[in-house]
Each structure stands twice: as C-alpha cells, then as structure tokens.
C-alpha cells in the first residue's frame, strides 16, 4: 500500500534539512519571487538548485510556491522564473493565478502544476474543472468538509492535498482583500498584514456594543493529529503542514510527530497523543482546533483572548515578595525556559535565568514545587503561568537535526570471481539500480584469502554518504584475494552512480503559445449591483445590466443573478449569472465573472473568455496604470479587445469567512470597529460571513472608458 505523502514547509535551507531529517516525503518552498509568504526567508535561485538536489538525493520531492497574483508587467519575469525551476527539475509548481496556469500549461507541457489553496477550490465541481483543465493536484480550501473531499477522491482522478496542522486564515484563502484595502499590503501578493490578529469592537445595527475589544477574528491553529486516520481514509494523497515562516525546530518537531502518526496508522500501532499534543503546544499554538474540514464548532474555531503563542500552562503565581516571584508548579520548569504570565491588561514574558526552590539554586524545578524566580514587574497573585519555550526540548531537537541520521536503504550484490573484474550491483529503496564493473581483476590468493565477512565489512562503510546497507549478497570464489583499496573504490563509484540516478531529470519542453480568441467590440456600458427593489428603480433606466443576489429582484431582462462566492450545492439555472468561484465556471454556460477571480493580467482575462465568460470583472487590486497595461497588452498579444468591467463605486467585500460571528453574537448585520474607529459592515449569510471595507473605493467613469474598459459597475 502506498502511504499518504507528508508535505512539510521550509522557509529556508535550515528548515528544509530539518524537515527531511524528521521524515517528510516532500517539501514546499518559496523563492524570492511570487511567494505568498513574502516575509519568510525564502530561497535564492542558487539555493533552490541546492535544495532540489539535496531533497532528491533523499527521495524527497520539492514543490515551489508561485501562489500570488501576477501583474501584467511581471509576466516575462514570471515566465523566466518558471522556466528556471522547470529546467532544474522542480517536481511541481503551486499556482494561484488562473491566467498564469493557462500560460504555463501551453508553454511547458511536462511541468506539473498544483492548484493552490489560494484558488479557493472548495467543492466537487471546482475539483472536476481543475482535472479537466490539467491540474495534477488541488490543494483544497481548508474549509472543505471531509465528506466532500471523500466524494471528490472517489469520483475524480485527481490528487488532493489538505492542510493538517498550522496557522489558519479566518478568510477563505485567496478571497481576502482586507490587508490590501486597509494596509496596502496584499495577501494575494505575499505581504499580508494579518489584520485578523488585531483587536476589534463589535456593534449591532443599533450601535449596541456586543463585546469587550478583543481578538474577534483571530483563529486558533489547526491540529488534526487525533483525527488523522479519518483524513487518510478519504484517499487524499498529501497531508500538508503550514509553517514557512516558522523556525527549523518547529518544522522538525511537527514533521516528526505527524511522521510517527502516519507510520503508526499504516502499522496499526498506537501513539501517545496526549504527549505529542503537549509537545506541539509547547513549540507553538494559539489554541488548537480540528478545523472546519472536520466540522469544528463555530464557537471553538477562534481564540478571541490572545493572538499569539500560548504554550502550555505550567503553574500559578502563588505570591510576589519584592523582586521574587513564587510560582506553584504543575509541570517541570528549567533554566533558560521561556515563560509568560497572563494578565487582563498586559502579559509579562521572559526567559528564566535563575531559580530557587526552598532557597536553594536549581537547574530544574518539578511539579508540585514552589519555584522562586527574579522578576521586577508587578504581577498579580493567582495569575496563570505559561511555558512558551521548553529550552531542553529545543536543544534536543537541534542536536537531532545536526546528527543528520536519515539514510537511504540499499541492497548490494557483489560478484568476485577469480581472474574477472570485480562487480557490484546496488538497488535502493525506490528501486533505482546501478551496476559498476571495476578495472580491478580478482586474483588467486597466495597467502591470506579474503572472506565474505571482510568484503561485507568494507562495503558497509557508507558513513560519509546518505546510504545505509540493507541486504548484502556476495557471489565469490574460494581462495581469492581482493585489495581493500579496490573494494573501497568499488563502493564509492557505485554510490556516486546511484547519486546520479536519484538526481532524476524531468524532461524539459517549451512550446510556443498560440492564442485564439474572439474579439469584443469597444463599448461604454454601465452595470449595477442592487440589494432591494428601491435600488432597482434607481438604476433601471441607467444600467445596461443589473446584478441581483436574490431571485425576487429579477424584475426585468436586464437583471442577472449574482451567485455566492462560496457554493456548497449548486442550483440548476439556465439564464445568465454572475459567478464568483471556480466550480461555477464548469456548472454554468452563460456567465460573467466577478472580482473574486482576482484578475490582474491579460492571460486571466483571455482564459476566462476561453472558458465562456462574456464579461470579466477586474480585481480591486488594480489601479488605473494596471488596468491600462492589462488592456493594452491584451490587444497586443491576442489581436483582440477584451470585454472587461471595473467596479467604480463600492464598499468592497474585504473578507468572506466560514467562521461566523453572527452565530455567537446572534445578528444578521453588525459592524466591526478597529483601533482607528473605522467601522466595517458584517453580514451573516448563514453559511458564511462577509466583511465589507470601511472605505468606499471609487474610479472615474470617463477615465475608465478612455483606458478601454467596456463596462463600469456601481455596487449599491
């Protein structure tokens, strides 16, 4: 039985080596360009080459994330970068931008492409379309229920990857515009400002305050360790750990624990989940949730008290005597551990540099003891004390990483026949086989003949390589002599040949992209998105198209139904629709596409037109210059005019979230207030929550027409 892949993050070379040492099957990394973790260390081009070679020697695959939207001016740089990756044998690239997928699929037929979770594929139809288009794998949206994943895997021949551990976005991935709109740092460009980790007040429609300025949108961290068997049974091919911005010790520990759990599942063994989860918590946690994939309760998904690492509770403050803090311990505390003392106003954190128990200096204080620690800050009696860094655990992990004991198992056959060249055949665990015939000719022994054990001992000396000897078979004549140097040379050259075999080459082929698209005539049209009958009568004589989100507002032939951005079950509908998510491109035949496809380049417009979109709405993340560049390049590249729309007047949908504050605080509509007193409208749509930007976005209508935009829209 083929085991599920364990896929680990690596923000730099240290983390990559830690992940491999801990037992991962694949790693995902980002380069200095087009990575959705722009603040991670990331890899230079030379480091990427080194990383691929290092990983491939161990039989570990390397996937490179190119999971951002790509502006028109960046397309050539993007193409050169992917060409470089392909020529250096990357196992796959992970893509968000649908236009760049179109370009790469046409240009590089041998390149394996995975659909990033940033594409927000969350249903059966989305996965089916990905298969039809040529994606090898889909990284499913974290919100996708396990039963949907199981059905996709059962019916569709496509690889599925799911997240099993790490940080969570509160918003559906790829659908968060909040950071870009508020802080000019785009989550779709790798520079998310994490505004979901900040404090907010919540008010109902009547301006009644519903909370006490806490972290309403700050999610807990995903941990599926105790549910891993359920996930594996669905048939997914890859289990992904989040954490390209985490340090090497985190990467090692999380990988090691999930490696143990996966192997134990297949070997029908049990593991100590409690101990594993405590260690995971000590390394990093904001509280753990099993996530919406495993149908976590809405009210257990977020941690509104604190947005940072919580560690594990290790005791309570018993008293404070001058500068001495007395902590009653319910766990072990050591020198150099990091602790945090909780307080309603402000936590206090520090490293333990001295400690006494019963006035005696101690390196370690144990459960039940009262440890005295120097602390010159005010601390309240009864405060909880958290262990946030287990120094000895981190030290042990560092040692394990440096020991570098991961080895590739090999079987060897030696042939030693008198008056014939010495031969060796080596087969590794992945069934790679090499043979080597030495120039050395086996001699008849004059005095001392060599024994089989001596040959095996010499061939087993693989200490400075990645290999470990498994089975050894020696076919030899009696009473022969072999020079020890010849055996060493035989082993060394055979293993170098095996290295070359393991550093496999992915066939590189590049085609010319030959576009073929119909031309749209230049027009100057208007559209509107409405929410009520009053809105309809305001715009019915001005707008050429009126988008409505409720069928009761389909009041004339101008009206087009706007479908949700998140669809768990599709309705049959034969008229034109405005679609906002991937699966709808397959389900419906007569459609326009909405802003949520994050279209910022001409290839995305081209591809959506090819898939049937009559009109393509551009992303909120484009300015006038970006719009002009896109349209000009479209006309130049494809010898046609695009039919694009720009939303000129709206409060943009900044977030769409499965996590729903409306359930907890019992509202259909409310407002978030940030630290600057900006207010964001929230709408509870039952199946998801939409948060709107506090500020209206506007474009000049006439200027847009001059740029070649065919339609401008007002969202009322």
Image (spheres, helix red, strand yellow):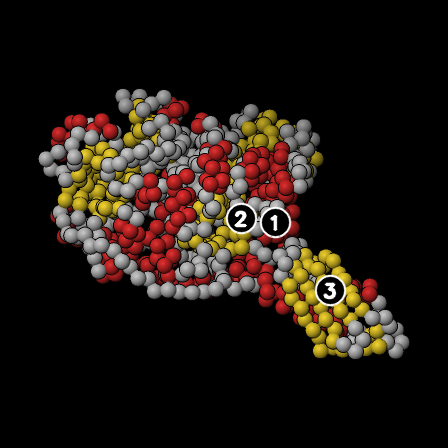
Tag 1 or tag 3, which sits nearer the N-term? 1
- Classify residue 657 by image quadrant: top left
Q: Residue at x 17, y 29 (%)?
A: 555
How packed mark 2 is, by other alpha carbons closer than 10 Å (few <14, some 14-19, many 20 or more), is many
Rounded to the nearest angstrom, the CA distance separating label 3 from label 1 is 30 Å
Circle 2 residue: 8
Residue 621 visible in the picture:
no
Check the image and report above or below for 416 versus 209.
below
Circle 1 residue: 22
> Nearer the viewer's eye, disc 2 or disc 3?
3
**Secondary element at image label 2:** strand
Check the image and report above or below for 550 versus 57.
above
Is mark 2 in CB contact (under 8 Å) with mark 1?
A: yes
How packed mark 3 is, by other alpha carbons closer than 10 Å (few <14, some 14-19, many 20 or more), is some
- Classify residue 201 by image quadrant: top left
Q: Position of residue 379 (x, y in %)?
A: 52, 29
């Amino acid at each position: 039985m083929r085991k599920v892949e364990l896929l680990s993050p690596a923000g730099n070379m240290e983390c990559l080596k830690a992940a491999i040492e801990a037992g991962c099957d694949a790693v995902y990394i980002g380069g200095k360009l087009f990575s959705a973790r722009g603040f991670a260390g990331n890899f230079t081009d030379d480091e990427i080459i080194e990383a691929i070679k290092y990983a491939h020697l161990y039989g570990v695959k390397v996937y490179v994330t190119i999971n951002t939207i790509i502006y028109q001016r960046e397309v050539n740089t993007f193409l050169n970068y992917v060409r470089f990756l392909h020529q250096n044998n990357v196992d796959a690239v992970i893509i968000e931008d649908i236009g760049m997928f179109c370009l790469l699929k046409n240009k590089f037929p041998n390149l394996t492409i995975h659909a990033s979770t940033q594409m927000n594929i969350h249903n059966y139809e989305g996965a089916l379309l990905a298969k039809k288009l040529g994606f090898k794998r889909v990284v499913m949206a974290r919100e996708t229920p396990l039963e949907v994943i199981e059905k996709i895997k059962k019916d569709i021949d496509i690889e599925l990857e799911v997240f099993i551990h790490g940080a969570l976005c509160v918003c559906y991935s790829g659908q968060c515009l909040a950071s870009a709109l508020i802080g000019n740092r785009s989550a779709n460009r790798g520079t998310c400002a994490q505004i979901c980790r900040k404090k907010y007040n919540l008010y109902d429609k009547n301006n009644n305050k519903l909370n006490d300025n806490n972290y309403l949108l700050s999610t807990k961290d995903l941990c599926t360790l105790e549910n891993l068997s359920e996930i594996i049974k669905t048939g997914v091919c890859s289990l992904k750990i989040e954490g390209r911005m985490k340090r090497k010790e985190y990467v090692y520990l999380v990988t090691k624990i999930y490696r143990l759990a996966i192997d134990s599942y297949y070997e029908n063994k049990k593991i100590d989940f409690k101990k594993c989860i405590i260690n995971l918590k000590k390394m990093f946690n904001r509280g753990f949730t099993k996530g919406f994939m495993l149908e976590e309760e809405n009210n257990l998904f977020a941690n509104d008290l604190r947005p940072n690492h919580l560690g594990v509770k290790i005791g309570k403050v018993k008293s404070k005597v001058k500068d001495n803090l007395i902590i009653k311990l319910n766990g072990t505390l050591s020198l150099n551990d990091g602790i945090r003392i909780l307080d309603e106003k402000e936590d206090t954190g520090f490293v333990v540099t001295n400690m006494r128990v019963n006035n005696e200096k101690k390196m370690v204080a144990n459960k039940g003891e009262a440890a005295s620690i120097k602390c010159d800050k005010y601390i309240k009696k009864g405060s909880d004390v958290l262990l946030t860094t287990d120094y000895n655990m981190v030290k042990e992990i560092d040692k394990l990483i440096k020991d570098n004991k991961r080895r590739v198992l090999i079987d060897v056959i030696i042939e030693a026949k008198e008056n014939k060249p010495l031969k060796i055949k080596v087969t590794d665990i992945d069934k790679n086989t090499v043979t080597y015939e030495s120039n050395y000719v086996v001699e008849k022994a004059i005095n001392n003949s060599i024994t089989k054990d001596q040959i095996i001992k010499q061939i087993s000396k693989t200490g400075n390589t990645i290999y470990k000897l498994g089975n050894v078979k020696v076919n030899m004549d009696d009473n022969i002599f072999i020079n020890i140097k010849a055996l060493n040379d035989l082993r060394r050259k055979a293993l170098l040949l095996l290295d070359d075999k393991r550093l496999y080459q992915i066939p590189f082929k590049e085609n010319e992209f030959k576009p073929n698209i119909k031309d749209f005539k230049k027009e100057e049209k208007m559209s509107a998105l409405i929410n009520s009958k009053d809105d309809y009568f305001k715009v019915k004589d001005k707008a050429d198209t009126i988008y409505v989100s409720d069928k009761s507002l389909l009041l004339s032939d101008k009206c087009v139904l706007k479908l949700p951005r998140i669809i768990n079950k599709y309705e049959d509908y034969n008229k034109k629709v405005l679609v906002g998510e991937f699966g709808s491109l397959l389900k419906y035949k007569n459609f326009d596409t909405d802003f949520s496809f994050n279209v910022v380049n001409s290839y995305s417009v081209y591809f959506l037109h090819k898939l049937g979109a009559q009109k393509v709405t551009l992303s909120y993340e484009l300015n006038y210059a970006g719009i002009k560049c896109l349209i000009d390049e479209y006309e130049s590249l494809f010898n046609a005019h695009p039919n694009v729309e720009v939303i000129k007047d709206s409060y943009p949908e900044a977030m769409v979230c499965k996590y729903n504050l409306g359930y907890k605080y019992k509202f259909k509509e409310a407002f978030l207030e940030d630290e600057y007193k900006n207010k964001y409208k929230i709408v509870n749509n039952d199946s998801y929550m939409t948060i709107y930007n506090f500020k209206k976005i506007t474009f000049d209508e006439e200027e847009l027409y001059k740029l070649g935009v065919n339609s401008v829209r007002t969202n009322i």
